[in-house]
Each structure stands twice: as structure tokens, then as C-alpha cells.
Image (tube, rainbow, N blue to C red):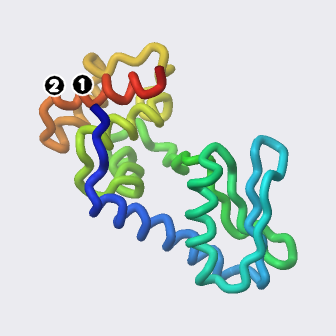
């Protein structure tokens, strides 16, 4: 069974991400170029004439090229924004509850569901726990237990969401 995010979470994500993109886009000279990079190869380029058009264009390209980096480059070639491949720019403090919560809130808002929490932890497991994902056992990790307790989630519900997330990649 695949769980989906509530509509409000998509709105919150869009506001946070588009706000960052728009803020960076205002620094560019126009027309700017949005460049999609897969590894070291440019796979798509698109001209944008105004800062207001940049967030929407980045969002569309992010969906079309989910495993690619997206750069917004000013008319003079200066890179004003970089969107990693569906990754979150991680705070080096992810191993602390405060650092983790700050990064999670950027991605999912203040109250994640069990599924969104499992997705976030799965996608950032090494940064959060210091362990490789292959060695993942969230049931015995104290940091993950603290996170689950912080949100007052049921541990069994979280583990069901975790198993759902792990099985998505199989």
C-alpha cells in the first residue's frame, strides 16, 4: 500500500522550495538559463526571461529530470542557484535532534506523517545516523527513537512506514 502526502504538505514544500529559487533568481541578470546536468553532461537548457518564471520552470524540470542537478545561471554565466537531484542540502548537524528537525521541517513542514518521516530518514540515513543504509535498523537506533518520540508517533506505525519505504526500492 502506497501512502501519499496530505495536500497541505505539498503546498508547504512548494512555498519553501520556490521561495529559495525565487530569492536566488532575483540575483541573476536576464535572460537567465536553467541548465539540467546528469553527471557531467548537460541534458537540457532553457532560457527564462524573468525571475518570476524561474521557480515554475525549475519545478517542472525537477519533475522531468528527478536524478539530475539543476542550475540557474545568470546571463553572465554566474550560477545563482543549484537544485541537487531530489536531495536536500543537509545541515552538518543532522545527528542532533535540533539539526534533524530543522532539515525535516524544510522538506515536510512542522508535522510529518509516519510515511514522510520514514522517507526522509531513509533518504538521509547516513547523515542522520552515521551508519550505512545497508546496516539500517531503525528499531535499535536511539536517535531515530528520539525523533519518533518527538513527534509522538507510534513506533509500530513508523516501522510499517519504514518497511513500505524500504520495499519501494526493491
Image position, residue 56 (x, y; %): 56, 72
| Residue tagged 2 | 156
Image position, residue 107 (x, y; %): 41, 54
Determine the residue positioned at 63% across, 75% down: 54
Left or right: residue 146 compared with residue 39: left
Determine the residue positioned at 41% across, 36% down: 95
| Residue tagged 1 | 159
Determine the residue positioned at 30% across, 50% down: 5
Image position, residue 40 (x, y; %): 83, 44
Image position, residue 112 (x, y; %): 26, 49
Cα–Cα span, label 1 and label 2: 5 Å
User: Against 68, is 80 above or below?
Assistant: below
Q: What mark, if any, has residue 116 been given in the picture?
A: none
* SS at circle 1: helix
Left or right: residue 79 compared with residue 151: right
Dividing the picture into quarters, in which one does residue 81 lie? bottom right
Q: Label 1: few (<14), some or many (≥20) within 10 Å?
A: some
Residues at circles 1 and 2 in contact by the CB criterion of under 8 Å: yes
Closer to us: 74 or 5: 5
Name the residue furthest top. Answer: 135
Closer to us: 13 or 170: 170
Q: Label 2: few (<14), some or many (≥20) within 10 Å?
A: few
Left or right: residue 28 compared with residue 140: right
Dividing the picture into quarters, in which one does residue 105 lie? bottom left
* Image quadrant containing the N terminus: top left
Name the residue furthest right. Answer: 76
User: Against 40, is 13 above or below?
Assistant: below
User: Against 147, is 54 above or below?
Assistant: below
Determine the residue positioned at 60% across, 56% down: 62
Dividing the picture into quarters, in which one does residue 57 lie? bottom right
* SS at circle 2: helix
Amino acid at each position: 500500500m502506497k501512502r501519499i502526502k496530505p495536500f497541505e504538505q505539498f503546498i508547504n514544500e512548494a512555498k519553501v522550495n520556490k521561495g529559495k529559487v525565487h530569492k536566488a533568481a532575483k540575483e541573476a541578470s536576464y535572460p537567465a538559463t536553467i541548465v539540467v546536468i546528469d553527471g557531467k553532461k548537460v541534458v537540457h537548457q532553457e532560457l527564462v526571461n524573468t525571475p518570476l518564471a524561474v521557480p515554475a520552470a525549475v519545478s517542472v524540470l525537477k519533475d522531468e529530470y528527478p536524478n539530475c542537478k539543476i542550475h540557474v545561471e545568470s546571463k553572465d554565466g554566474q550560477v545563482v542557484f543549484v537544485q541537487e537531484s531530489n536531495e536536500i542540502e543537509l545541515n552538518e548537524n543532522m545527528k542532533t535532534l535540533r539539526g534533524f528537525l530543522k532539515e525535516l521541517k524544510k522538506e515536510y513542514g512542522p508535522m510529518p506523517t509516519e510515511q514522510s518521516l520514514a522517507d526522509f530518514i531513509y533518504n538521509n540515513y547516513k547523515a542522520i545516523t552515521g551508519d550505512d543504509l545497508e546496516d539500517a535498523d531503525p528499531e535499535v537506533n536511539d536517535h531515530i527513537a528520539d525523533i519518533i518520540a518527538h513527534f509522538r508517533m507510534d513506533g509500530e506505525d513508523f516501522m510499517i512506514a519504514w518497511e513500505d519505504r524500504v520495499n519501494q526500492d526493491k
